[in-house]
Amino acid sequence: MNKKPQAVSLTIMGKEYKIVCAPDEQIDLIQSAGQLDVQMRKMRDSGKVTGADKIAVMAALNLAHELQQLKNQTAMLNPVLSECLAKMTRKIENVLENQ
């Protein structure tokens, strides 16, 4: 399989960008660009933020905030999931021992 980096064309707020990335990362890159485009257009259309650079910073800040919230949720869920898995493992072991 060809793993050579390839250029991907992305359009964000009407501007085209060519980004080189590995073939197995292209779908994620395209989706990320789409999310950024949506965020930037929302900022622009709200009329509260003007200027492409300010819009880009605010959109990036919103996406970074969402990412941080997901990381925090994941960090809180990991111990809970670990405990659930440990309980299930103990139950399975008990069943297997009692056969």
Image: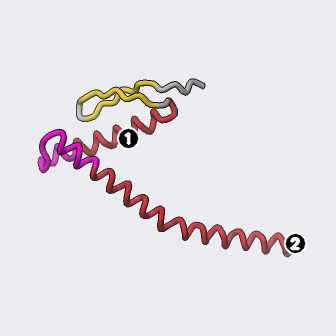
Residue shown at the point (12%, 47%) measured from the top left: 47
CA gap, disc 1 and disc 2? 51 Å
- Give above or below for 22 relative to 84: above
Specify the principal SS of the magenta part: helix
Magenta range: 42-60
What is the number of the mark on residue 99? 2
Q: Quadrant of the C terminus?
A: bottom right
Q: Amino acid at mark 1?
A: Ser
Identify which amino acid the numbered label 2 is placed on: Gln
Tag 1: Cα neighbours inside 10 Å, few (<14), some, or many (≥20)? some
> Looking at the image, is mark 1 or mark 2 nearer the viewer?
1
Residue 59 is inside the magenta segment = yes
User: What residue would you read off at disc 1?
Assistant: 32
The dot on residue 64 is none
In the rendered view, tell whether residue 38 sits above or below residue 10. Answer: below
Whole-percent x and y of residue 14?
A: 23, 30
Label 2: how many residues lie within 10 Å, few (<14), some (14-19) or many (20+)? few
Q: Secondary structure at mark 2?
A: loop
Residue 50 located within the stretch drawn in magenta: yes
What is the x, y in percent for residue 43? 20, 47
- Viewer-closest of 72 and 96: 72
Left of 5 or right of it: where is 36? left
Which residue is nearer to you in this view: 7 or 41?
Answer: 7
Q: Secondary structure at mark 1?
A: helix
Name the residue: 32% across, 50% down. Answer: 63
Q: Earlier in the sequence, mark 1 or mark 2?
A: 1
Q: Position of residue 34 (x, y in %)?
A: 34, 38
